[in-house]
Image (cartoon, rainbow, N blue to C red):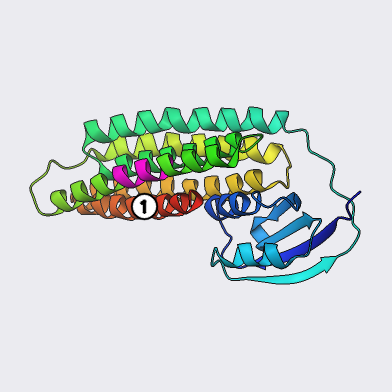
Amino acid sequence: MDIVQKSTFIISKMDCPSEEQMIRLKLEALNEIKHLNFDIPNRKLEVYHTEKVDNIHQSISELKLSHQLENTEDEVELPLAADDSKQRKILWWVLGINLSFFMAEITAGWISSSMGLIADSLDMLADSFVYGLSLLAVGAAISKKKNVAKISGYFQMLLAALGLIEVIRRFSSYEVMPVFHTMIVISFLALIANSISLWLIQRTKSNEAHMQASVIFTSNDIIINAGVIVAGVLVYFTESKYPDLIVGMLIFGIVIQGAYRILKLSR
């Protein structure tokens, strides 16, 4: 029986689901890897392996995430495999909530002429991709994961780029004022939906990577929802379209950044 070692890495740029998935896809290709334990809030990764740590160190270095090896322990026991049936159920619920609000927000954004709502809907779609990748991660071949990541990344990039072009066009042309009360109501409902998603995820009390990452991602979504609500209030008080366009541009930028990170997973 192979002797299992545990190497602990500090990865300073590992702060969202994209980096976690990137590292997972990179290391899962190595035969000596037996288990990965991510602690995203503390930027820490524990790698259980049967060979020297050099190859693992090199693989992480190639991702350029500013890491350092903290220590390596010899002859450790592998953690018990977790029962992920509950986590799968929670992720399916969260995925359903995000897809539903993607449809609701993009429809309401189009009707109300709000780029903030349309951008927020694409952020919800981006989250759906992350949750979908988390569900796919169990038992799937690495090549399949990379193909899904590539398709997801390019699709997000295309939608966000089209959104930015539309924002720029609206900045330089006459447009109907966005309907501020629709912005506020729909974003408030999305905020409630994301709060429910966060509550569901936290109920699992899981320390596993994809669940920790989902907590961070969903918490960020709540901040974005609040931003669109503030933009709606500013549209009302200033009687200007610009608060909506500025928030829309910022959110599209976030979506493009997320798409770029997802595309890095497919390399």
Furthest-left residue in view? 174
Whether residue 138 is situated above or below residue 61 in the rendered picture? above
Q: Is residue 234 left or right of residue 142?
A: left
Percent of width and height locating residue 240: 18, 51
Residue at the spot 47% in from the left edge and 46% down from the top edge: 221
Q: Is residue 175 left or right of residue 74?
A: left
Residue at the spot 73% in from the left edge and 43% down from the top edge: 206
At label 1, counting other C-alpha atoms closer than 10 Å, the crowd grade (few under 14, some 14-19, many 20 or more) is many
Q: Amino acid at mark 1?
A: Ile
Percent of width and height locating residue 66: 58, 71
Q: Tell which of 266 and 46 is nearer to you.
A: 266
* Residue 155 among those drawn in magenta: yes
Write down the region rendered in magenta.
152-159
Percent of width and height locating residue 159: 30, 42
> Chief secondary structure of the magenta span?
helix
Whether residue 77 is situated above or below residue 80 in the rendered picture? below
Q: Report the number of discs.
A: 1
Percent of width and height locating residue 120: 37, 43
Q: Quadrant of residue 150?
A: top left
Q: Considering the numbered disc 1 on the image, is that residue within a helix, a strand or a loop?
A: helix
* Residue 254 among those drawn in magenta: no
Residue at the spot 47% in from the left edge and 40% down from the top edge: 147
Q: What residue does disc 1 label? A: 256
Residue at the spot 72% in from the left edge and 71% down from the top edge: 69
Q: Tell which of 162 and 148 is nearer to you.
A: 148
Q: Tell which of 38 and 265 is nearer to you.
A: 265
